[in-house]
């Protein structure tokens, strides 16, 4: 049975696919076909080579300073868009030569063409207004880098790629998730990595066995090329893949297999959630409220330990805040409410009226008490 890895486009979000690849390697999952659009095509060529560590080094090199010789004022989307926008006004888009140079230096054409793994990419011919779908057998060796770049030129952020007099733009303008191409190449099962980036998706002619991997957390803006964002994206891609293959648990947070299940079964008589799924949602809400690291892999104990550390750093709520809690409800956040209820519970008090109004925060405070997390002592 032939297995294909399908890699969507998504610009800087593509570092997430590096984490997916790391997990597939650890799981010893073999694939026979890789199809990709845009950044998915660039990652895909290295997957065909089986050059994971090379791809990892490349993701460290590609950043906004390298591309523009300057940095945006901040990593906020608006400042990054201003950088690309001003470049488009002055130059008609970012020159792709620097990325092209990295590919020229890095792609091993001999390894790629001799690999047992088949490959396909999608680009869009802006001159003829038609898509161009290419496979390893139809890409001339001397044009490999050209067509990889043609697939990845996200116009207008990047300049169009010219090949033999025709201009090409990002394949996402035709099919940003090339599932149909993988099926045409003979895939009987699919590992689909969908970055959820803007772009068209072609209708699939038939349904086959698929594992879909997509970001459960917010990953970086698609034009935010920087090493730290790439590192976080890759970690999340790794976690999500192991969750997709049932090796880890969790949704936005990641837990070792069965650690949540074990705690829930041993303590469900005192817990406030009727199901393990709703208990997990409550636990993850605590992690979100207290800003725990979403890239880490936790045991249940280590998760509670991190909650303890965060709460130890919180200042005790003063009497004025507690007294005026009703008038502050529009201004305070979920975390403050949780701490308010926890401080009352620790003092043997139960603000019944408020606990009904803010039942979610009250329940989370009760969980902190059940988990043995202390506040203000």
Image (tube, helix red, strand yellow):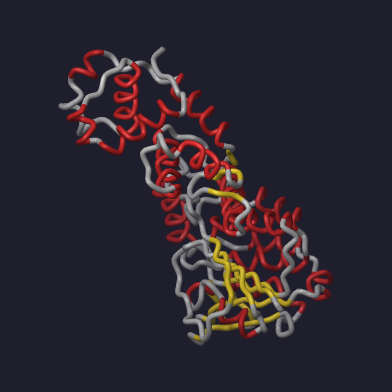
Q: In x, y percent, where is residue 133?
A: 60, 83
- The residue lying toward the viewer, choosing from 67 and 251, is 251
Q: In x, y percent, where is residue 227?
A: 61, 45
Q: Is residue 326 above or below residue 35?
A: above
Q: In x, y percent, where is residue 155?
A: 49, 68
Q: In x, y percent, where is residue 263?
A: 52, 38
Q: Is residue 86 above or below residue 310?
A: below
Which residue is found at the position 46% from the left and 55% from the top?
84
The quarter of the image holding the N terminus is bottom right
Which residue is found at the position 48% from the left and 80% from the top?
202
Quarter location, residue 190 = bottom right
Instruction: Report the side of 12 relative to 30 (left or right).
Output: left
Which residue is found at the position 42% from the left and 28% from the top?
370
Which residue is found at the position 20% from the left and 24% from the top?
325
The quarter of the image holding the C terminus is top left
Asked if residue 149 can be seen in this view, the reply is: no
- The residue lying toward the viewer, choosing from 87 and 144, is 144
């Amino acid at each position: 049975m032939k297995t294909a890895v399908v890699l969507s486009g998504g610009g800087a979000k593509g570092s997430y696919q590096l984490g997916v690849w790391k997990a597939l390697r650890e799981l010893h999952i073999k694939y026979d076909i890789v199809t990709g659009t845009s950044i998915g095509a660039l990652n895909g060529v290295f997957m065909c080579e089986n050059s994971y560590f090379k791809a990892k080094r490349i993701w460290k090199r590609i950043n906004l300073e390298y591309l523009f010789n300057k940095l945006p004022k901040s990593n906020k989307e608006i400042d990054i868009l201003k950088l690309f926008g001003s470049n488009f006004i002055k130059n008609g888009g970012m020159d792709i030569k620097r990325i092209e140079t990295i590919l020229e230096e890095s792609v091993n054409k001999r390894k790629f063409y001799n690999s047992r793994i088949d490959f396909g990419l999608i680009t869009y011919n802006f001159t003829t207004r038609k898509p161009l779908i290419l496979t390893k057998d139809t890409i001339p060796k001397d044009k490999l880098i050209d067509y990889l770049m043609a697939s990845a030129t996200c116009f207008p952020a990047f300049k169009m790629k010219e090949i033999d007099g025709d201009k090409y733009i990002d394949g996402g303008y035709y099919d940003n998730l090339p599932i149909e191409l993988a099926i045409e190449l003979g895939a009987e099962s699919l590992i689909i990595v969908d970055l959820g980036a803007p772009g068209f998706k072609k209708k699939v002619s038939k349904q086959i066995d698929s594992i879909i991997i997509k970001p459960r957390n917010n990953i970086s803006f698609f034009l935010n090329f920087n090493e730290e964002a790439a590192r976080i994206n890759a970690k999340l891609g790794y976690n999500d893949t192991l969750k997709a293959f049932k090796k880890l648990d969790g949704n936005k947070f990641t837990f070792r297999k069965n650690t949540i299940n074990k705690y829930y079964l041993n303590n469900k008589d005192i817990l406030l959630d009727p199901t393990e799924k709703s208990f997990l949602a409550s636990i993850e809400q605590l992690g979100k409220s207290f800003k725990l690291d979403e890239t880490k892999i936790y045991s249940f104990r280590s998760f509670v330990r991190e909650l303890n550390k965060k709460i130890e750093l919180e200042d005790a709520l003063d009497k004025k805040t507690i007294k005026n809690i009703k008038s502050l409800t529009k201004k305070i956040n979920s975390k403050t409410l949780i701490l308010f209820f926890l401080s009352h519970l620790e003092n043997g008090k139960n603000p019944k009226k408020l606990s009904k109004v803010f039942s979610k925060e009250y329940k989370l405070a009760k969980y902190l008490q059940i988990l043995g997390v202390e506040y203000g002592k």
